[in-house]
Image (cartoon, rainbow, N blue to C red):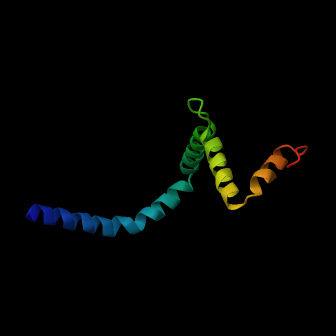
Amino acid sequence: MIRERIDHRIEKRMEAVLEPRIEEWLHRFFRTEKGEALIAEVTADFLLSWLRPDDAKGSYFQKTLLEVISQLSRNDPQFREKVIAALNPHWEGT
């Protein structure tokens, strides 16, 4: 019981000291060359994984785009025709 209280007090004290400074430290790090390189690497990895097809199911980008189009078409009945017209300007809706 005493050990748990001591652990809890130490944890709270560390939080009180570290938490306000963490954001400042991160901002300072991300402004350095290493920080910018890390941001670029993580962003590139994310974009590649987002755009890369996975097991013939399509890419995350494709899935996201189809989901957005699906939601928009539910909200706007004319949206489907607008998408088709944008993709094929020679198509005429019936």
**For residue 84, side relative to residue 74 (left or right):** right
Give the percent coordinates (x, y) of residue 8: 20, 65
Q: Which of the two residues, 73 or 68, is positioned nearer the viewer here?
A: 73
Displayed quadrant of residue 11: bottom left
**Outermost residue, front direction?**
94
Give the side of residue 31 with respect to residue 78, left or right. left
Residue 21, compared with residue 85, is above or below; it is: below
What residue do we see at 51% from left, 59% from top? 28
Q: Nearer the viewer, residue 91 or 26?
A: 91
Farthest residue in the right direction?
A: 90
Position above or below: 13 against 69: below
What is the x, y in percent for residue 61?
A: 64, 43
Q: Residue at x 57, y 33 (%)?
A: 54
Q: Looking at the image, how many numbered discs can be counted on the residues?
A: 0
Residue reaching furthest to the left? 1
Residue 73 percent across, percent down from the top left: 70, 55
Q: Quadrant of the N terminus?
A: bottom left
In the rendered image, the vertical position of residue 17 relative to residue 88, given as above or below: below
The picture quadrant where one finds residue 51 is top right
Viewer-proximal residue among 9 and 88 = 88
- Residue at image point 48% right, 58% down: 26
Q: Position of residue 77 (x, y in %)?
A: 73, 58
Q: Residue at x 75, y 56 (%)?
A: 79
